[in-house]
Amino acid sequence: MAADDVDVIVEQWRRERAGMRLEPMAVFGRIYRLARLVGDRQERVYAGWGISRGEFDVLAALRRSGEPYTLPPKALTATLMLTSGGMTGRLDRLERAGLLRRAPDPADRRALRVSLTDEGRRVVEESVDAGLAVQRQVLDALPPGDQERLADLLRTLLAAAEADEPGADG
């Protein structure tokens, strides 16, 4: 297999600091680069529907919630790991575009509910297929069994990283 840019960086460190354990750099360097490259491709795809990747995430969270495709803003904020200010900006843009609406919560008039519009549902259903195609194009470089194994390995790493977060149970 041909060397990549991460191999070059790792080799430079190996030359400059012999004995240093560089496996984390090799793994996470590739994860970061892969996430950036695929994320940038998805961003370009979503632009065809007039949305950003972050706005897609909001629409997708609403769509995944099931009918009636409605959530409180706090649930969206928690799901997407955003600040309330970051979420408000996304909701404002998506509401202006006619892809969602905010309305008082019938159970608590002081609270809001965010709902997909019919147009928002159409956009997210079309764009999720296009975004998955971008991911599939890259992932199909691996045979199906390796794809499943990679997903399992990454789940293990993610769980370890989340367990080390401040406030994590354990």
Image (spheres, rainbow, N blue to C red):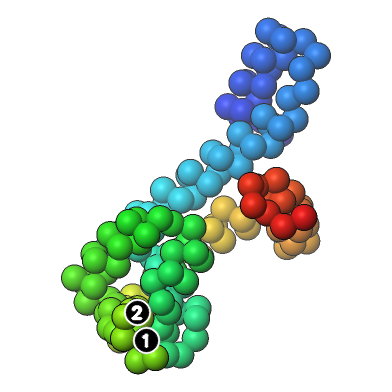
Residue 83's spot in the image, x, y percent? 40, 55
Question: Residue at (31%, 80%) from the top-left corner?
Answer: 110
Depth order, front residue of 139/149: 149
Residue at the disc numbered 1: 108
Depth order, front residue of 89/149: 89
Question: Residue at (69%, 37%) from the top-left corner?
Answer: 27
Q: Relative to 163, say whether 1 is above or below.
A: above
Say what secondary structure mark 1 lies in. strand
Residue 156's spot in the image, x, y percent? 76, 53
Depth order, front residue of 99/44: 99
Residue 6's spot in the image, x, y percent? 61, 28
Q: Relative to 30, say whether 106 is above or below.
A: below
* Label 1 packing within 10 angstroms: few (<14), some (14-19), many (20+): few
Residue 111's spot in the image, x, y percent? 34, 79
Given the current orientation, which residue lies at the most extreme right position?
19
Res. 100 in view: yes
Given the current orientation, which residue lies at the most extreme top position?
16
User: In the rendered structure, are the residues bearing label 2 and label 1 in contact, judged by CB atoms less than 8 Å apart?
Assistant: yes
Which quadrant of the view contains residue 14? top right
